[in-house]
Image (spheres, coloured by chain):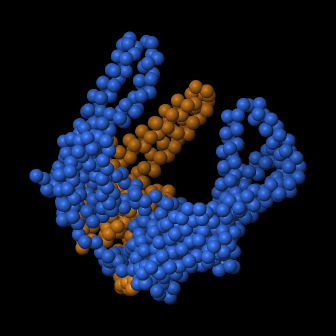
Chain colours: A blue, B orange
């Protein structure tokens, strides 16, 4: 009986499963070959069935070789608190996974697994992009592995979130939800609607070409009419805007109507929805960023948009686990819950503001787009329409200035605030213990302007602060790493 | 109540990342880099030949010339890229420096590492070189790959990192 302390292959019956998987994949790729052979009159083998049989036999032989090599080279064992996994034929790899970093152990049992009395053990870590590791084991081996993992696994440090009375309830007014939905930037929605309409327009190609010609001629004549008087486009845009506005409000009401929050010290549970009630749960330890947005209108009416971003892994998908809260400014409530009572009074350790590089970075794509659009309009003699790229560029300049003004990073004692946003002000609150990677990047212009980009990555979000003074960025870089280290040493 | 830490941050005794001595990769890694680059451009060239030759031979020649010029330019900066590329291990984190046009330094604390692995691809196998991949839970930059290491160095790094992960946990 093995205790998994020495390199160990999977259960012998696992070979059958690997063989079936290989066979399926090889036959899947050779299916085109099979179809091509059916109609190949010049083939050496005359009979069609014999040809198909030959292809299947070759596929089976190939699958046998591949699966045996895979089975033979796939070994695993547990040593000093690590699950060590060796695999690969062409690209050999030995992965060491600390047992305490295993996020979940999932088992799967398909038809073939059940017939052979096997279990597929899928090992997930927080490493999102890493391929899942699957071990195919029989029940005995699975139980022994589980026992060994439990023996080796060290108790995890627990964090102590702030104390709250259990079952406290907070309600979100529908009036504020409606008001905040009206305060959003609906122009983005117009772009989406435009994209949707362009898809429909793309499908018009499927309609018989006569129909398309009729529509095309009509559109051309209508466009000529509009081209003569550009102001005629205004009512069209206004109509689209109103449609988008209604869609936005409808969507917000459908999803977030009558929202209520039940909270205690470790968990936030939201229930919301107009037609069907949905619930979203946020564990204190799983939240990795609080995103707060306030645009001009939201600030005017005391509203804000807030997102609680959670740590993602292979079992959690990006948007499903994030909830957007529209309505009255409740940021201080959520920030107090997550960062502690004195989050607002904590002094700044260092603040660094972005320079003009942010403005250039924001403006450059819009500038290129405007120039290209102007060139196209001039080429088609639509000079009167050149005001559109001109206005677009003007808005881009304002956007660039606003982006530059908003972009900065502040380090506090127990958390960081990354400020950003274009027309709206965005604040991202991150705890040091959630920082996974820190990166500093220079550009070809760094030697002249002495500015760099600082990037911070967490398990659920990524932030880049551009055009920071090189000395400040390097100091922040070191402080981030030191603070990250000290918070994990203190089991924050 | 939530624990608010207020530890003394000792920047004086920490070696800043920009003052670190980055370890160079094995000399043979340059050959791997050259082979990989040439193979990539050969693929581009073949694709362009396949797509453009049938319709327009002039465009095909122009595209091939552009690809060849890009290859030559790329090969000239490979030496510089090799000299700049390196890794550094500190007490609590590992850093990788890379890039010629956009020089970048990436640092991952040991306490955030999820797994460490040693690997070889068919080209590095020819030169008997290995790569160490350190995987963390970040949404982007979820792995840091140190390529062009001898077996001995790769094992040393792996052992050191695994030991550090354990120490950080304890």
In the rendered view of the protein, which quadrant contains the N terminus of chain B? bottom left
Image x and y of residue A165, in percent: 43, 84
Query: Is residue A94 among the parts visible in the rendering?
Result: no
Specify the farthest residue to the left: A1
Q: Is residue B9 above or below residue B133?
A: below
Front residue of A310 and B35: A310
Q: Is residue B37 visible?
A: yes
Quadrant in the picture for residue A294: bottom right
In the image: residue A229, left or right of residue A298: right
Q: Quadrant of residue A491?
A: bottom left
User: Is A119 drawn above or below residue A252 in the view shown?
Assistant: above
Q: How many labels, in total?
A: 0
Give the residue drawn at x 32%, y 44%.
A110
Residue shown at the point (69%, 52%) measured from the top left: A194
- With A227 as the anchor, is A114 left or right in this view? left
Residue name at image x 41 percent, y 24 percent: A34
Residue A121: give x, y in percent of width and height.
28, 52
B68 relative position to A22: left or right: right
From what the image shows, is residue A79 above or below residue B13? above
Kindly identify the residue that appears in the image at 42 percent across and 81 percent down. A166
Which quadrant does the C terminus of chain B fall into? Answer: bottom left
Along the line of sight, the residue nearer the viewer: A357 or B111? B111
Residue nearest the viewer, comparing B144 with A210: A210
Viewer-proximal residue among A59 and B8: A59
Left/right placement of residue A444 relative to residue B145 reads right
Image location (x, y in percent) of residue A247: 68, 59
| Residue A94 position within the rendered picture, expressed as x and y whole percent measured from the top left | 26, 52
């Amino acid at each position: 009986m093995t205790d998994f302390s020495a390199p160990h292959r999977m259960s012998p019956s696992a070979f059958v499963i690997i063989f079936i998987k290989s066979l399926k994949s090889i036959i899947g790729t050779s299916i085109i070959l099979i179809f091509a052979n059916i109609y190949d009159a010049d083939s050496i083998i005359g009979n069609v069935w014999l040809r198909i049989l030959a292809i299947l036999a070759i596929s089976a032989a190939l699958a046998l070789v591949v699966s045996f090599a895979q089975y033979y080279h796939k070994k695993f064992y547990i040593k000093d608190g690590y699950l060590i996994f060796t695999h690969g034929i062409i690209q050999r790899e030995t992965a060491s996974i600390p047992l305490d970093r295993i996020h979940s152990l999932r088992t799967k049992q398909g038809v073939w697994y059940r017939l052979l009395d096997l279990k597929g053990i899928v090992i997930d870590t927080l490493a999102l992009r890493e391929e899942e590791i699957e071990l195919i084991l029989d029940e005995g081996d699975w139980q022994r592995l589980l026992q060994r993992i439990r023996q080796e696994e060290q108790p995890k440090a627990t964090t102590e979130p702030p104390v709250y009375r259990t079952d406290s309830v907070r309600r979100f007014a529908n009036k504020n939800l409606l008001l905040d939905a009206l305060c959003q930037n609906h122009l983005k929605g117009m772009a989406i609607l435009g994209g949707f309409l362009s898809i429909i327009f793309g499908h018009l190609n499927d309609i018989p070409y006569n129909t398309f010609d009729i529509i095309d001629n009509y559109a051309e004549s209508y466009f000529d009419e509009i081209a003569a008087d550009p102001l005629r486009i205004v009512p069209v845009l206004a109509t689209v805007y109103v449609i988008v506005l209604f869609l936005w409000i409808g969507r917000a009401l459908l999803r977030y109507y009558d929202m209520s929050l039940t909270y205690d010290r470790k968990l936030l549970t939201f229930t919301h929805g107009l037609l069907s009630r949905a619930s979203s749960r946020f564990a204190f330890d799983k939240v990795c960023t609080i995103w707060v947005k306030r645009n001009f209108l939201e600030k005017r009416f005391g509203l804000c948009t807030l997102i609680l971003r959670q740590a993602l892994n292979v079992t959690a998908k990006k948007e499903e686990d994030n909830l957007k809260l529209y309505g009255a400014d409740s940021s201080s409530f959520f920030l107090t819950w997550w960062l502690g009572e004195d989050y607002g009074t904590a002094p700044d350790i260092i603040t660094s503001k972005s320079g003009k590089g942010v403005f250039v970075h924001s403006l450059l794509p819009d500038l290129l787009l405007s120039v290209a659009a102007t060139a196209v309009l001039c080429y088609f003699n639509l000079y009167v329409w050149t005001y559109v790229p001109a206005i677009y560029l003007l808005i881009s300049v304002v956007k660039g200035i606003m982006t530059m003004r908003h972009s900065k990073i502040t380090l506090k004692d127990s958390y960081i605030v990354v400020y950003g946003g274009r027309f709206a002000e965005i604040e991202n609150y991150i705890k040091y213990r959630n920082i996974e990677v820190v990166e500093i990047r220079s550009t070809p212009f760094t030697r002249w302007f002495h500015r760099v980009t600082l990037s911070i990555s967490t398990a659920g979000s990524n932030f880049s602060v551009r055009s920071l003074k090189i000395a400040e960025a390097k100091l922040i870089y070191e402080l981030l790493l030191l603070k990250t280290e000290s918070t994990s040493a203190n089991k924050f | 109540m939530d624990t608010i830490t207020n530890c003394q941050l000792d920047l004086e005794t920490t070696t800043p990342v920009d003052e670190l001595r980055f370890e160079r990769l094995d000399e043979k890694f340059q050959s791997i880099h050259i082979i990989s680059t040439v193979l990539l451009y050969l693929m581009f060239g073949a694709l362009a030949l396949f797509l453009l030759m049938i319709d327009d031979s002039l465009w095909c020649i122009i595209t091939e010339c552009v690809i060849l010029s890009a290859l030559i330019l790329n090969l000239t900066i490979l030496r510089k890229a090799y000299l700049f590329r390196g890794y550094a291990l500190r007490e609590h984190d590992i850093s990788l420096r890379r890039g010629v046009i956009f020089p970048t330094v990436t640092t991952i604390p040991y306490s955030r590492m999820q797994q460490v692995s040693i690997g070889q691809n068919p080209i590095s196998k020819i030169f008997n070189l290995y790569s160490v991949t350190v995987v963390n839970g970040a949404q982007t930059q979820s792995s840091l790959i140190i390529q062009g290491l001898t077996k001995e160095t790769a094992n040393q790094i792996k052992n050191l990192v695994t030991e550090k992960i354990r120490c950080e946990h304890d």
